[in-house]
Image (cartoon, helix red, strand yellow):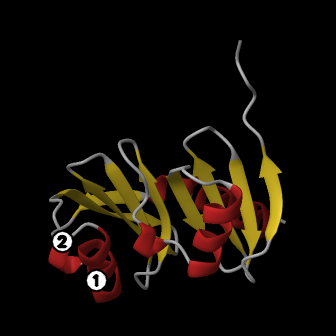
Amino acid sequence: MISMKMFLYTLLALMMALPVAAEDSEIAFDKLPEKAQKVVQKAFPDVKVKKVEMERRASLIQYEVKMTGGAKLQFSKDGTLTECECTKGSVPAVLIPAKIKDFLAQEFPGREIRRFEHDSKLYELLLDNGDELSFNSSYRLIDIDRAVEQK
């Protein structure tokens, strides 16, 4: 019985310590996965990298790249783009799948994309008017969250 209590206390202590094991560290741009470096160079050829951080959370590793123009990109461990947010201007068109770009040109002409998020099943976009669009992995629109108009 005492060994069971000790086991449970140890397990509880480990579980509480895991979130504390998070670690963010600044790294050089050339330490990013090569795939991520190519995306940054292609999407922002004339913009300087301000800061690159590697974020560790238990077994999860991701990278965040901040550009001097106000753009922020996030990449998975293997260098796959998972998010791009632009506080000034729009998300570069080269980062948006062609079918989504075509849909936006037809249904939302003149709108700029401020944030683009992607995982294996979903693409989410925030437009400059506040509308949020969700597309499935086949690039079909599955949801529109319209911005509330303010008077």
Q: What element carries label 2?
A: helix
**Up-down: is 44 above or below 22?**
below
Q: Point out the residue furthest to the top here.
A: 151
- Residue at (59, 62) in percent of width and height: 14
Q: Earlier in the sequence, mark 1 or mark 2?
A: 2
Q: Nearer the viewer, residue 26 or 69?
A: 69
Report whether 62 appears left or right of 53.
right
Q: In this view, does 96 lie above or below 12?
A: below
Whole-percent x, y for residue 10 in the image:
64, 62
Q: Quadrant of residue 23?
A: bottom left
Quarter of the image where one finds residue 40:
bottom left
The residue to which callout 1 is attached is 38
Q: Which amino acid does label 2 sit on?
A: Phe
Q: Which of 80 and 57 is in front in this view?
A: 80
Mark 1: give few (<14), some (14-19) or many (20+) Cα within 10 Å: some
Task: Residue at 21%, 56% (x, y): give it.
Answer: 51
CA neighbours of label 2 inside 10 A, class few (<14), some (14 to 19), many (20+): some
Pick the residue in front: 58 or 103: 103
Which quadrant is home to the C terminus? top right
- Residue under pointer 2: 29
Q: What residue type is labelled 1?
A: Lys
